[in-house]
Amino acid sequence: FSRIYIFDMCSISYSFINLLNISIMAIKFKMVPRKNLGDDQAEHPVKQYAQMVCGDLVTFEELIEEVTDGSGVSSASVKAVLDRVNVVSIRHLRNGRRVNLGELGNLRFSFGSDGVTDAKDFDVSMIREPRVCFFPGKALRIAKSRTNFEKVTVSEGKNEGEGGGEDDRPVIE
């Protein structure tokens, strides 16, 4: 009985240490100047804003390898299941259904349209292409709430990952 107790305590300790290691990781950001669109723009026409610096892309093959290592399932099986989830999700989304992906979250389509003054004048061609909306599940919401941030200098941030966290908004220099 005492050996089982010691083993359980060790498992709990290792799990706690792993949680600590996960929480130490941080998302990097850099400061960028942008036009101030707030009420105080007359006083401060430009403000500094945090912008995420994207890390390296985890390739599909890397993801499959990690899932395979931690599950005891072959990489071919993992690929087959993910491919099937994709096919089935698309079918349900195209039929107007929401798709629950467990702790990962939910998917649904959303769309907009041009407006008309009289409903008789509406044509289906006025509907814009649907967007995929993702709503994170509990696991992702918890991970999001435990995120830490680390500021990097501009020279560090320039070569970080693909795209360097840039967005389509103009940067004022």
Image (cartoon, rainbow, N blue to C red):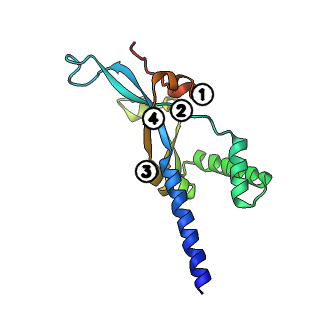
Give left or right: position of 173 versus 162: left
On the image, the x and y values in percent for residue 37 come to 28, 22
In the image, 73 versus 112, the foreground residue is 73
Q: Badge 4 is on which residue?
A: 112
Please identify, in this view, whether the residue under mark 2 or under mark 4 is nearer the observer.
Answer: 2
The amino acid type, in three-letter code, at marker 3 is Arg
Q: Badge 3 is on which residue?
A: 146
The residue at 49%/32% (across/down) is 127
Q: Secondary structure at mark 3?
A: loop
Q: Secondary structure at mark 2?
A: loop
Q: Is residue 111 visible?
A: no
The amino acid type, in three-letter code, at marker 4 is Gly
The answer to whether the residues at label 1 and label 2 have Cβ atoms under 8 Å apart is: yes
The amino acid type, in three-letter code, at marker 1 is Glu
The answer to whether the residues at label 4 and label 1 have Cβ atoms under 8 Å apart is: no
The CA distance from mark 4 to mark 3 is: 34 Å
On the image, the x and y values in percent for residue 38 come to 25, 25
Q: Badge 2 is on which residue?
A: 54
On the image, the x and y values in percent for residue 121 come to 43, 30
